[in-house]
Image (cartoon, rainbow, N blue to C red):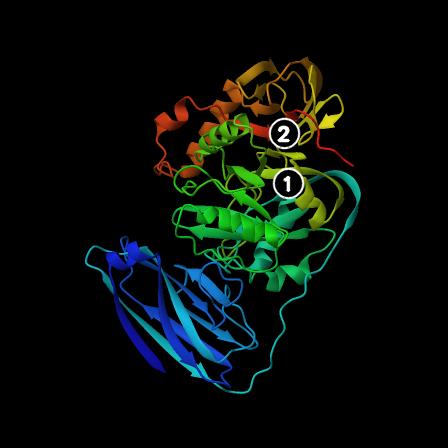
Amino acid sequence: MTTITAHITRADQSKSPYFYIPFDVPAGTTRIDVTLAYPKADDCVIDLGAFDPRDTGYPAAEGFRGWSGGARDRYFIATDDATPGYIHGEIRPGTWNVILGLYKVPEAGVDVTVTITLDSSPRILEPQPARTFPVRQGAGWYKGDLHCHTFHSDARGAPETLHRAARQAGLDFLAIADHNTVTQRRYFHPQSSPDLVFIRAMEVTTAEGHANVYGVDEWIDFRMTRPSDAHTLARMAHDKGGLLSINHDKPPIAWDYELPEADCQEVWQSTWLAWNWIALDKWQARLASGLRLSAIGGSDFHQPVDLQPEGPLVLARPTTVLWLPELSEDAVLTAMKSGHGYVTESPNGPHLEIDAHGTPMGGTIETISSVSVTARGAAGEILSLIDASGEIARIEITNADWQTEIPVTPKTFIRAEIIASETTRATMLAEFAALLEGRELPWQLRNVDLRDQPIRRALSNPIYVGRPASTE
C-alpha cells in the first residue's frame, strides 16, 4: 500500500484543470485499488479517474481506465472486473496515473490524500463486451431518449433499472451517455435488442461545456483545456465514425468553447421550463447563419436507485422521434445526422411533421412555395412556422388529427413549433408548481423568467432551401 499526499492550489487549477499523481505498477499485478480523501465542501470538489501507461496526454487514443468525476472517492480496476465507470482488463506494468479533476478548489488550497493498493492474486482476464447489431424491420416513426445516465457516472441507478424505465416509457431506442466513460456498455451491449435498441454514447463533460459523442465504442478524450480543443473533439468523434452533439447550450452549463463541426444540437433538455428557450434561440441563430445542425432532445435523466413512475421529470422528457427505414443503431444515427425527425415533450407528446413538395424534414429543396404540416394530439395549440428571419406564419391547430397546407416563401430554411395555448400554458405552469411542493424554482429560475416565455410542446427539424447535394 502506498499513500501520497499533495497540496493543490488555485494556481494548479489555473495551470490545468487536471492534476496527475503517478504511481508504479509492477508486472504480475491483477488488481489496483485507489482511495481519495479530502475535505469535500461546496467550494471544494475534486474529481477522480485513472490512466494506464499508454496515455500520451491530450488528445490520447489509449490509456484511459476510468472516470467517476465527483461521484466516488474510490475505485478498483482488475483483470476481471472494475468499479462502474472504470475499465477492467490487462493491468499493464509501468507508470499509471491517478487523475484528479480540479472542479472547485478553495482559496486556501486543499490537501488531498491518495491511497493505492496493488494485488497480484490470480484472476482471469475478462474480455470486453462485444457489440450487438439488433434490427427491427419496418419503416416508421420511432421514439427515443438521446441523453441519460446510470451509476457508471453520477447517477445512483443501475443500468437494469434504466432499462426498465425505458420499457415503461415505451421507447424504441435509448442512448446512455455517461460522463467521460463508456463502461455502461458492459450491460447495454448484450442487452440491446429489436425491442429496445441501445445507442452507443458518451458525454464529454468539462467545466466549460458538455457534448455527446454517438455511435463510437471507444472512449473519447475529454481533457479539453482551450477553446479550440472543440475542433479536436469533433475530429476525434468523426475519425471514429461518430456524431457530435452540443449539449444543453443554456444555463447553468452553456457551451463556452469554439463551435466545432457538430452534427446535432441538443435543443431541448429536460422539461421545457429549464431554460430551453435559450438553447432554441442559439440553434435558431446558427441555422440563420447558414449552419445545418440537426435538433435533438434528451432528458438528461439521472436514474435513481428505484424505478420512478411516469411524470414530467423522468426519462424521455423530452422524446426524440425519428423516421427510420428500420429500427437499428445505424438507422438512428443516420436520421439524427440528417434531421429526419422532431422533438416532442414526452413519448405521448404531440406529433409534428412538415414536408415541402415531397421533401421531408432534414432535406433540401431549391424553392418552397408551401409547406404541408401534420400535427396530432395538439388541438387548440398554436403552430408557428419559422425561417431565418423569424416567425413567418402562426395558426391555431383546430383538431386532434390536423393536416394543412400553408403557403410560404421561406428564407434559408423552414421549421415548425407547436406552442402551448394560454390555457394549456397555465395548466402546465400550475402542474410544475405543484411538483415543486413549495420549494424554490430550480436551475436558478425565477418567476420573471417564466412569466412571458412561450412553452413549446414540439419542435421540428428544418427543411433547407437551396440546391440539393448531388447524388451522383
Q: Is residue 72 left or right of residue 350?
A: left
In the rendered image, residue 224, in percent from the top left (x then y), is placed at: 43, 53
Q: Secondary structure at mark 2?
A: loop
In this view, the residue farthest toward the left is 108
In this view, the residue farthest toward the top is 407
> Residue at (51%, 78%) from the top-left corner?
92
Q: Is residue 302 visible?
A: no
In the rendered image, residue 233, in percent from the top left (x then y), is placed at: 51, 50
Q: Which residue is mark 2?
A: 350
Mark 2 vs mark 1, foreground winner is 1
Marker count (numbered): 2
Disc 2 and disc 1 in contact, CB within 8 angstroms? no
Give whichever of 106, 301 is nearer the camera: 106
Within 10 angstroms of label 1, few (less than 14), some, or many (20 or more) residues? many
Q: Secondary structure at mark 1?
A: helix
Q: Is residue 29 left or right of residue 240?
A: left
Q: Is residue 276 left or right of residue 329?
A: left
Give whichever of 463, 307 is nearer the camera: 463
In the rendered image, residue 87, in percent from the top left (x then y), is placed at: 53, 68
In the rendered image, residue 302, in percent from the top left (x then y), is placed at: 49, 51
Give whichever of 368, 271 is nearer the camera: 368
Q: Which residue is mark 1?
A: 337
